[in-house]
Amino acid sequence: MGKVVVGVVFDSNPKVYYFDPQDMEFKVSDKVIVETSRGFECGTISFANKMIPEDSIKGNLKPVIRLATKEDIKQHEKNLSEKSEILKTTVEQVREHKLDMKVIGAEYTFDRSKLIIYFTADERVDFRELVKSLAAKFRTRIELRQIYERDSVKMYGALAPCGMECCCARFLKDYEKTSIKMAKIQDLSLNPTAVSGFCGKLMCCLKFENDHYERVAAKLPKVGSLVNTPMGRGKVISTATLKEKVKVRFLQEDEDTNIKEHEFDVDEITQVRENKGEGKSKQKSSAKENDNAENLDKKQKDNTESLDKSKKQKSAAKGNNNTVSKDKKKKQNAKNAKNLIVKKRKK
């Protein structure tokens, strides 16, 4: 089952929101008054009555109240015209209260029952006194809403590194999920400042062509691998993902044409892969070589240890022999001395 909806966009956001037309017919670019979570708002029809699956609708649809009249449009234009004055007054009040916050934008709800002020701040801000002073000046309910830097860029716009307005402010309805891996696949610089947008996050446009790059990268051989080409077998020295081309350097030069390097389409080459048997035999031979090397190391260690032991034993034996000979000499000298003494006494 489906449900009939209309798409509505607002001045501060290019995202399309679904609303219940309530049996009313609308045309593209019609101004309408709708009920939102913030109150009544004036929006523009982006697509007319259309049946969509109920699965794509999140939550309950808010109704379209009516087609905007001339008075409604004048009221909406008046609300927009006062935006600059509101921002100026708010910035002055922020300075008076010495608050560390940056005012980004401001907007009235359609019936002026609420004034919403957007700001960014590095830390939590106590703005209770600021709200009181703003409420006294504008004589309406004040709502201060903290947003992130990315939302602020989307709200007031900025120039991207390409020279055009940021995608989020120009046409993106939702933020794209990006990662540094996308920059790597697209052969871009991995320096964060080179692949980051005005908001400091990775550029949303990395996502736009990423599917194509991933599909082509899956077909491209790795640099340094061997490939078969119409001109013979060669080695890949570089790849061009966007062109879907591979540059090959031939292992054997052709004497007639003297071609050393040539560029081929991905579909013209096939990658050389090792047979499983060859791979296993290579693994076995390398394992045997490793075992032999380990055995040699063990033998060398054993030999050195045995030599060290024999040297120590010889040195110990020599030491013992020396000590024994010294003791014998001492005893012999002592006997000789006693014999001399005995002879002298007899005389």
Image: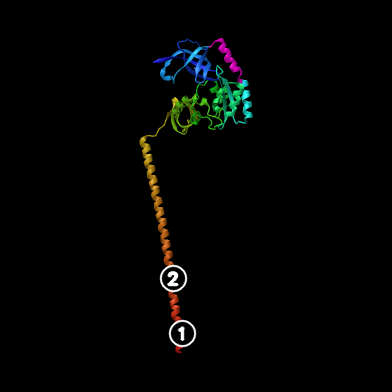
> Colour scheme used in the picture?
rainbow
Amino acid type indicated by mark 2: Thr
Nearer-the-camera pick, 210 or 27? 27
User: Badge 2 local density, few (<14 within 10 Å), some, or many (20+)?
Assistant: few
Nearer-the-camera pick, 211 or 29? 29
Nearer-the-camera pick, 194 or 276? 194
Question: Residue lying farthest left?
Answer: 277
Q: CA distance from mark 1 to mark 2?
A: 28 Å
Q: Position of residue 7 (x, y in %)?
A: 48, 15
Q: Position of residue 81 (x, y in %)?
A: 61, 17
**Residue that numbered label 2 is attached to:** 323
Residue 129: name its quadrant: top right
Residue 55: name its quadrant: top left
Residue 76 on the magenta span: yes
Q: Could you tell me if the residues under marks 1 and 2 are in contact, i.e. CB atoms within 8 Å?
A: no
Which SS does the magenta portion mostly show? helix
Number of marks in picture: 2
Amino acid type indicated by mark 1: Ile
Q: Is residue 158 visible?
A: no
Q: Position of residue 138 (x, y in %)?
A: 60, 21
Q: Which mark is residue 320?
A: none
Q: Is residue 52 visible?
A: yes
Q: Earlier in the sequence, mark 1 or mark 2?
A: 2
User: Badge 1 local density, few (<14 within 10 Å), some, or many (20+)?
Assistant: few
**Which quadrant does the N terminus fall into?**
top left
Circle 2: element type? helix
Residue 93 on the magenta span: no
Residues rendered magenta in the picture: 68-83
Q: Position of residue 323 (x, y in %)?
A: 44, 70
Q: Which mark is residue 341?
A: 1
Circle 1: element type? helix
